[in-house]
């Protein structure tokens, strides 16, 4: 492989930064969706809370999320 076909160190570094930024955006998006899901579980309607509390597992379900 000749040196003209290999990517430069700058190109490799730039691609790494782009990949890391993309990963961070993905992680932040996933975090936001998980937080919204948790808020939904914590603030569910009264009827749903009663169903979960009947067998005492509401807190356990929230911790599992």
Image (cartoon, grey):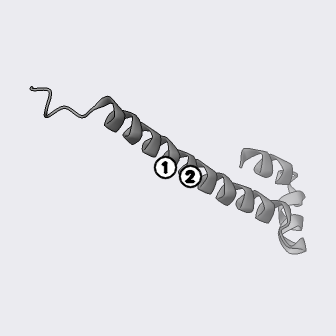
Position in image of residue 44 (x %, y %):
83, 68
Distance of label 2 from label 1 (alpha carbons):
5 Å
Query: Of helix, strand and loop, which one carries label 2?
Result: helix
Residue under label 2, please give it: 25
Position in image of residue 48 (x %, y %):
83, 69
The answer to whether residue 63 is above or below residue 37 is above
Position in image of residue 16 (x %, y %):
41, 37
Q: Which mark is residue 64?
A: none
Q: Residue at x 71, y 61 (%)?
A: 37
Query: Of helix, strand and loop, which one carries label 1?
Result: helix
The answer to whether residue 49 is above or below residue 14 is below
* Depth check, front residue: 56 or 4: 4
Q: Residue at x 49, y 49 (%)?
A: 22
Asked which quadrant contains residue 11, the reply is top left
The answer to whether residue 40 is above or below residue 60 is below
Give left or right: position of 28 versus 8: right
Q: Residues within 10 Å of mark 2 (few under 14, many from 20)?
A: few
Tag count in the figure?
Answer: 2
Q: Residue at x 77, y 65 (%)?
A: 40
Taking the view exactly as shown, the residue that stands out farthest to the left is: 1
- Marks 2/1 in contact by CB < 8 Å: the verdict is yes
Q: Quadrant of the N terminus?
A: top left
Position in image of residue 59 (x %, y %):
85, 49
Give left or right: position of 4 versus 56: left
Q: Residues within 10 Å of mark 1 (few under 14, many from 20)?
A: few
Residue under label 1, please give it: 22
């Amino acid at each position: 492989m000749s040196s003209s076909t290999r990517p430069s160190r700058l190109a490799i570094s730039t691609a790494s930064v782009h990949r890391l930024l993309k990963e961070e955006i993905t992680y932040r998006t996933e975090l936001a969706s998980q937080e919204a899901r948790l808020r939904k579980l914590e603030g569910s309607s009264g009827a749903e809370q009663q169903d979960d509390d009947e067998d005492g597992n509401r807190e356990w379900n929230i911790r599992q999320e």
